[in-house]
Amino acid sequence: MQNENVKQAVQYLRQGKIIAYPTEAVYGLGCDPYNETALKNLLKLKQRSWKKGLILIASDYKQLEPFLQPLTSELETKLFASWPGPITWLLPAKTGVSHYLRGKSDKLAVRVTAHPQVIALCKQWGKALVSTSANTSDIPPCITASEVECGFEDKIDYLLPGQVGDRQRPSEIRDALTDEVLRN
């Protein structure tokens, strides 16, 4: 059944729809990072300014490469030592990456997940996925499927059932070039 749910989620992503899915700590909202309409709809749903940018989540680094400038060997060592896992890194984005993903920055927030269901989702999808917490501005993120259903009612297109991981907080965000911690 789990595999069928993942397949169904991918069908919605291919149609430019918004899905909700469990991550390491909270439920996330996601869409196709190449679909500008889906990105705008997701930001509107979250009541979030495009200026903040979004996170991309992936099953492996290869899914993130199309969005990023090439890594130095030093950056590779740092990132790959922390992945898969709960650290989101800000890295220089390639020219042409949507401002809806980057926000006002020339960097992009990316993570290789350790959550088994999200790994399966990204593998089935075949590419990185937008990952932002399932909440609107100034409201705590949803931790259960029922919270997502209550909070978003008919505003999302598909809810992937599952359990969030055992982390107490959303992923830490660090700037890979400066090591500044932006969220812990």
Image (cartoon, rainbow, N blue to C red):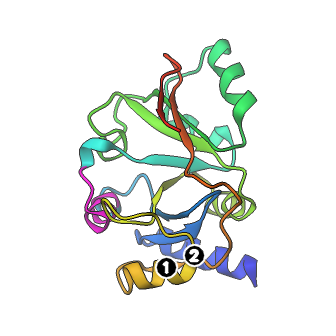
- Mark 2–mark 1 contact, CB under 8 Å? yes
- In the picture provided, is 71 more to the left or to the right than 76? left
Q: Secondary structure at mark 2?
A: loop
Nearest the viewer among 39 and 171 is 171
Going by the numbered disc 2, the residue's amino acid type is Thr
Residue at x 34% of width, y 27% of height = 106
| 42 sits to left or right of 4 | left
Mainly helix, strand or loop, the magenta region? helix
The amino acid type, in three-letter code, at marker 1 is Glu
**How many numbered discs?**
2
Quadrant hosting residue 132:
bottom left
- Identify the residue at image location x=38%, y=79%: 152
Residue matched to label 2: 144
Quadrant of residue 27 in the image? bottom right
Mark linked to residue 38? none
Q: Residue 147 shows which numbered tag?
A: 1
Q: Is residue 47 above or below residue 127?
A: below
When the figure is inspected, residue 100 is found, relative to residue 47, above or below; the finding is above
Q: In the rendered structure, does residue 15 fall within the stretch colored magenta?
A: no
Query: Looking at the image, is 178 positioned above or below residue 29?
Result: above
Task: Estimate the x, y position of residue 105 in percent, counting from the top left.
Answer: 31, 30
Q: Dividing the picture into quarters, in which one does residue 156 lie?
A: bottom left
Q: Pick the residue in front: 60 or 156.
A: 156
The location of residue 88, given as percent across then percent down, is 56, 39
What residue lies at 57% left-to-right and 49% top-to-bottom? Answer: 57
Q: Residue at x 72, y 62 (%)?
A: 120
Looking at the picture, tell me which residue is in the foreground, 19 or 140.
140
Q: Residues within 10 Å of mark 2 (few under 14, many from 20)?
A: some
Q: Is residue 46 magenta?
A: yes
Range of residues picked out in magenta: 39-49
Local secondary structure at mark 1: helix
- Disc 2 from disc 1: Cα separation: 5 Å
